[in-house]
Amino acid sequence: MALFSFIGVEAAAITAKRVKDPRTNVLRASVIGTVASAALYVLVTAVVMGLVSHHTLVNTGSPFVNAFQTMFPHSAWAGQFVAGVAVISGLGALIAWTLIVTETSRAIAQDDLFPRPFAWSDKRGTAWFGILVGTALPSLLMLWRLLDEFWPDGLHLLGGPERRDGRDTVLLLRDRPVDVPSVEASPRTGLATGS
């Protein structure tokens, strides 16, 4: 049995401060959004399972392309259409999660539980610092991962990807990273000891 987690229901509550009549609209958005998502999941799964053979579903990584190719045989555009829909969906998710990260960090900063700059707003009420940090950090992490793919021996992070010989390394942009001594907990005291 498969169990799907509907993560994101709390997103409607996070942005409640910016919603007209939040008592009614946040409740409505949470309930309608959850029911609509569940119905869409069931409907799409049933359609794909009804259109594509079991053997194909087991061996494919793109069941939606197979479903469109079944509905429109001899069409070369099915793959591009599914890819386009995925890009639109990804952009929508990116915008939504940027808003959620920004609003969450703003609310925490306004309660003095997070650095104050996250509460900074421009004249339109946009938490620009939170947007900047919330987009810059993931972009840097993706860049780091991309560089690691194309330059595996030049970019390393302590505790991150291990070198080919299995030893951890420090973040350095050079051909030969510096070795870092491993740290283990002492069995007697539980404190960290270097080797």
Image (cartoon, grey):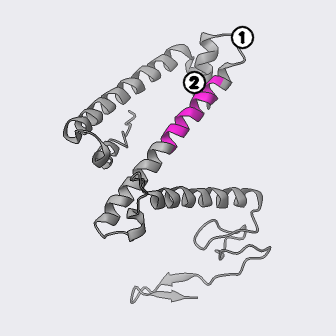
Q: Residue at x 55, y 88 (%)?
A: 194
Q: Quadrant of residue 65?
A: top right
Q: Residue at x 51, y 82 (%)?
A: 184
Left or right of 115, for residue 30: left
Which residue in the protein does label 2 denote?
A: 64
- Up the image or down, 104 lies above or below 36; here it is below
Expressed as whole percent of the image width and height from the top left, the position of residue 103 reads 37, 53
Left or right of 149, for residue 129: left
Q: Residue at x 55, y 20 (%)?
A: 54
Q: Quadrant of residue 75?
A: top right
- Up the image or down, 183 lies above or below 51; here it is below
User: Of helix, strand and loop, which one carries label 2?
Assistant: helix
For the image, the number of numbered tags is 2
Please identify the quadrant where the C terminus is shown.
Answer: bottom right
Which residue in the protein does label 1 denote?
A: 74
Q: Which residues are magenta?
A: 81-94
Check disc 1 and give the amino acid type.
His
Left or right of 134, for residue 6: left
Q: Is residue 61 visible?
A: yes
Q: Mark 2 vs mark 1: which is more N-terminal?
A: 2
Expressed as whole percent of the image width and height from the top left, the position of residue 25 reads 25, 35
Expressed as whole percent of the image width and height from the top left, the position of residue 2 reads 40, 34
> Is residue 92 or residue 132 the one in the foreground?
132
User: Of helix, strand and loop, which one carries label 1?
Assistant: loop
Q: Residues within 10 Å of mark 1 (few under 14, many from 20)?
A: few
Q: Residue at x 70, y 75 (%)?
A: 172
Q: Is residue 59 visible?
A: no
Asked if residue 88 lies in the magenta stretch, the reply is yes
Check disc 2 and give the amino acid type.
Phe
Q: Residues within 10 Å of mark 2 (few under 14, many from 20)?
A: many
Asked if residue 160 lies in the magenta stretch, the reply is no
